[in-house]
Image (tube, grey):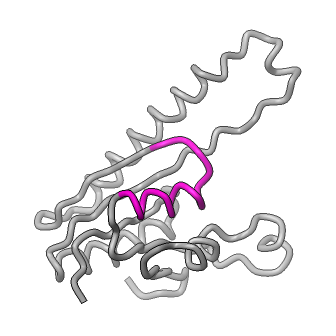
Amino acid sequence: MDIRTILVPVDFSEHAEKALTWALALAEQWRARLILFHVVSVPTPAPIVLGIHFNLTDFEAALLEDAKAKAKEFVARSGSKTAQLEAKVISGQPFPEICRVAEQEKADLIVMGSHGRTGLSHVLLGSVAERVVRHASCPVLVVGKKAQE
């Protein structure tokens, strides 16, 4: 097995931070390139909001800039001196974008955290990790909330 590129989708939560820790260890072991990836989900504003000086384009740009700053901070906090680490931030829907970028970047592995929702919250919110596992073109390592650092 030759792992050259690892994609790490993050939502800036503690679960994503744990997944990044795992991905960094793997990247250092395999001397792989690591791509920290965040998808900004732009909400569809209610029609009432649109009528009151609301510019969706500016709002999306602000969300993207904020996410880029958080990604930069996430990379800086990783503390890795040996792994080749880059950050990528786009807008869209997380599940399809993760799968698309994994293919585009020719990722050999996706490492992502899971919130571990069950029951009604899982039914209502779904699981991005679960859909990525089912549809990704490469193996996916899901780091659960109980996984050791």
State whether the magenta stretch is mostly helix, strand or loop: helix
**Residue 89, how many percent across, how many down?**
43, 45
Query: Residue at (32%, 50%) from the top-left corner?
Result: 87
Among the 4 quarters of the image, the one containing residue 81 = bottom left
**Residue 39, how many percent across, how many down?**
52, 49
Query: Residue at (49%, 66%) from the top-left corner?
Result: 14
The part of the chain drawn in magenta is 90-104
Q: Magenta stretch: residue 97 in it? A: yes
Q: Height in image: 89 above or below 136?
A: above
Query: Left of 97 or right of it: where is 31?
Result: left
The quadrant the C terminus occupies is: bottom left
Residue closest to the eye, 78 or 50: 50
Disc tally is: 0
The quadrant the N terminus occupies is: bottom left
Q: Height in image: 76 above or below 106?
A: above
Among the 4 quarters of the image, the one containing residue 130 = bottom right
**Residue 36, how many percent across, how many down?**
36, 58
Query: Left of 3 or right of it: where is 49?
Result: right
**Residue 72, how many percent across, how many down?**
32, 46
